[in-house]
Image (cartoon, helix red, strand yellow):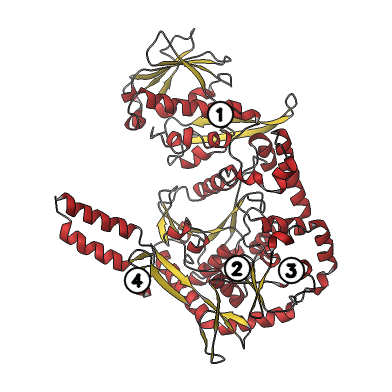
Amino acid sequence: MIKYYCQVCGNYLEPKLIDKNTNKCLVCKANLDKIYNKYGNSTKIEEKKILNDFRVRFNESYVKHEYKIFWSKTGNVPVFDDYCNVYSEKCTYISNDIRPVFPEEQLLLQILTGDEYKIINQSVWYTGGRNYFINGKKLKVSRSKMMLKDANELAIEYNRRKDEINYIQFEYIINKFVELNQDWFSYLKDEAISNIQKVAKDYEDDEMFISFSGGKDSTVVDDLVTKALLHRKVIKVFGDTTLEFPSTYKYVERIKADEYNRKYSKVLTAKNKHDDFYQLCDIVGPPSRVMRWCCTYFKTTPISDRIDRKFKNKKKLLTFYGIRRNESQSRSKYDMESDSPKISKQRVFAPIIDWFDFDVWLYIVSTGIDFNKAYRYGYSRVGCWNCPNNNDWAMFLSKIHMPELSKKWTDTLMDFAIKTNKEDPKGYVEDNYWKARQGGNGLAIADKAIVNFQPCVTEADTYNYHLSKIITEGLYQLFIPFGKVDFQIGNKRKGEVFILSSKGIPSIRLQGKIGTDLLKVTILDIKEMGGISRKIKNVEDAKRKIDCQITKYQTCVACSGCKSVCKFDAISVTNETVFNETTGNYDVVVDYKINENKCARCGECIDHYDSGCYMKKVLRTKKGK
């Protein structure tokens, strides 16, 4: 059962009173329209304030979906409604969402709980937190206590008892679940298919693609698109982060081998083929919940590059995504259909945006489609298996089901803890303090993120920089966003290079010889820096932007974050990771170039990230450390 509640006006709403795209309340919209018609042209401050208050109210009028799941006592399965028509019985509320527990997970739970509860071959469902439901009765378990058990011993016991995994009873239970919820399944499927067909009618086959992660949500979206656009050739783009579950790779291979997909929906893989995750961990430290540099390196940039190459000549593009509003607070405000924030010609459509886990699993088991086997073991998500956003239970499952990968990651974390002089390296790793780390304290590369300079005492608006990296021609590439780089008009003996406006007016003078680490920068005219000038109020602003580029020059490890935000495809970044025998660490040799003819001097590559470079945040060190 689902009810819709506006958190602003306090009304329970019928579906027709909700904007399905934005998930906003149309009652609040109607109230805003009335006030606008009354005060829209008013010049009175009080009436303008009233109008603004209503605008604010409408902007916050997101509709809360109050989802309730019930239990059919006779059917012994969860149902969507509080009344079961099949058995003519009133059903009991059990939770706001639920998912099935597959026999593989049932076996592990049985081992963890001992003989106290009968779990295997029962109707077992998970509702979140500590709560499982077995045959309609709540079972609270302490996962924290379970995780104190030795994972290696559990893995041995699990493998010894694998023959207890039996799908005969499970399939009977699932078939009953499907039978009792078939009306809701039909509604979900028909609505999603209709919405897909409506949005796709204005696009050609080669102007659409499915964003495919190998997870349950993108699996459902893929099947819905196939049913809605049968025999239309819509490709899938799979982002291989190089850290996917082994089961994900096997699943993707099955998808590729499918006869229909080979003919109508081929899988294109987007992958960073140049970098090694573990080598980068050695350079910049492991990712954390606040510093997920891995997403930029291995997900966002490779996928953006793959899309750009595949659809380079297309004027419009439609992407089908499997995002859902109930996954997180940030996603609760997503629109069903929206413009891509990164690719101007791209529209994003999320056909299951209002679905819950119950709906997703109902669709999967009702249709019988293939899915990622990791879910059978109890994982709630199957992105990168060692993502810092994964909960402790997921990491515990990996120790049991993927011991070799888990050990490799634990060793990497331990090496980092020791190298950066953590007081208790073992506790730092085992208690997951690495997930909360901030900055680059203890890392050699972090020193390069510091910009050392002194104001020149003899020349106005001039600064003397002592670089942590010797000057190469690559330094001047970073100044192209400010204007044209001119090597001719300056004093070559002094190593002078000027940055010119489109009118040929010098805006910046650089003075530094190739092969040295001293750079003198003079800001000549802040009004002649192209589009960047519109964002500069004074010389201090201009210097901060120059500092950003110098930081980028010193610390760039080819994350390609700035490349991905450039809408003009003006930036190219190539790199090679090499082992430094002197330091015993890995170094990244980067070739960073900006195409002067493509660069619009908009400054987005400087302003998009704090301090001009995404890695600056990752490598920032605490004062006094």
Q: Residue at x 58, y 47 (%)?
A: 289
Disc 3 residue type (three-letter): Leu
Of pointers 3 and 4, the one earlier in the residue sequence: 4
Disc 1 residue type (three-letter): Lys
| For residue 507, above or below residue 21 | above
| Residue 11 - label | 4
Q: Nearer the viewer, mark 1 or mark 2?
A: 1
| Residue 260 - label | 2
Q: How far apart are marks 3 and 1 (CA)?
A: 47 Å
User: Which secondary structure, mark 3?
Assistant: helix
| Apparent side of residue 344 relative to residue 571 in the rendered image (left or right) | left
Q: How far apart are marks 3 and 4 (CA)?
A: 42 Å
| Apparent side of residue 95 relative to residue 20 in the rendered image (left or right) | right
Q: How far apart are marks 1 and 4 (CA)?
A: 51 Å
Q: Residue at x 31, y 23 (%)?
A: 503
Q: Name the residue under label 1.
A: 623
The reply to whether discs 1 and 2 touch (Cβ–Cβ < 8 Å) is no
Q: How many labels does the image show?
A: 4
Q: Which residue is drawn at 59% across and 72% down?
A: 364
Q: Name the residue under label 3.
A: 109
> Label 2 crowding class (10 Å Cα cut-off): few <14, some 14-19, many 20+?
some
User: Which secondary structure, mark 2?
Assistant: helix
Q: Distance between the residues labelled 2 and 3?
A: 38 Å
Quadrant of residue 598 in the image?
top left
Disc 2 residue type (three-letter): Tyr
